[in-house]
Image (cartoon, rainbow, N blue to C red):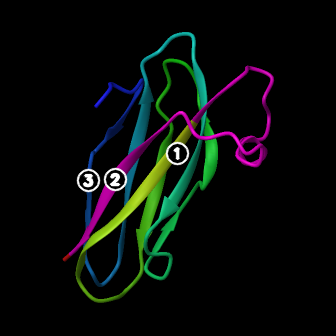
Amino acid sequence: MRAVPISVDPEMIKLAASGGTSSFRMMNDCPERRYCFKVKSTNNVHYRVSAVYGFVEPMEAPQVEVTRLDGPPKSDDRLEVLFMLVDADCKDAREAFTTGEVPEFSIDVPLIAE
């Protein structure tokens, strides 16, 4: 497995099955590369995210809030965060994902509801 230029903290999110909110940061340690992201979920019934699309600027760490709605305990859900390298003049992260290009890499964030 090759190293990716972005790390996620925390690497896993635990929430109460009855509902709650948590967040994670995506840290871009590369001083020259700008990425856009898209967050996909395996469970759109019980989870919401504050930003489905966005940018991770060089040397920055944007935060995404995750909200769990009331539901049964579950430990096999996850968020898949897709990343694409974009130029400084790219203004619309959502549009960047409509070009048909394959994302450069993805990071899975396990979701645990207890």
Compute the Cα span from label 3 to label 1.
16 Å
Chain-order first, disc 3 or disc 2: 3
- Per the rendering, the mark at residue 12 is 3
Mark 3 and mark 2 in contact? Answer it, CB < 8 Å: yes
Q: Residue at x 37, y 86 (%)?
A: 70
Which quadrant: the C terminus? bottom left
Q: Position of residue 1 (x, y in %)?
A: 28, 31
Per the image, the residue denoted by label 2 is 109
Per the image, the residue denoted by label 1 is 82
Within-10-Å neighbours for mark 1: few <14, some 14–19, many 20+: many
Q: Would you place residue 57 above or below residue 11 in this image?
A: above
Question: Closest to the observer: 12 or 18?
Answer: 12
Within-10-Å neighbours for mark 3: few <14, some 14–19, many 20+: some
State which quadrant residue 74 falls in: bottom left
Amino acid marked by disc 3: Met
Relative to 41, 20 lies left or right = left
Relative to 108, 33 lies left or right = right
Q: Residue at x 44, y 75 (%)?
A: 43
Chain-order first, disc 2 or disc 1: 1
Mark 2 and mark 1 in contact? Answer it, CB < 8 Å: no
Q: Position of residue 80 (x, y in %)?
A: 44, 54
* Label 3 element class: loop
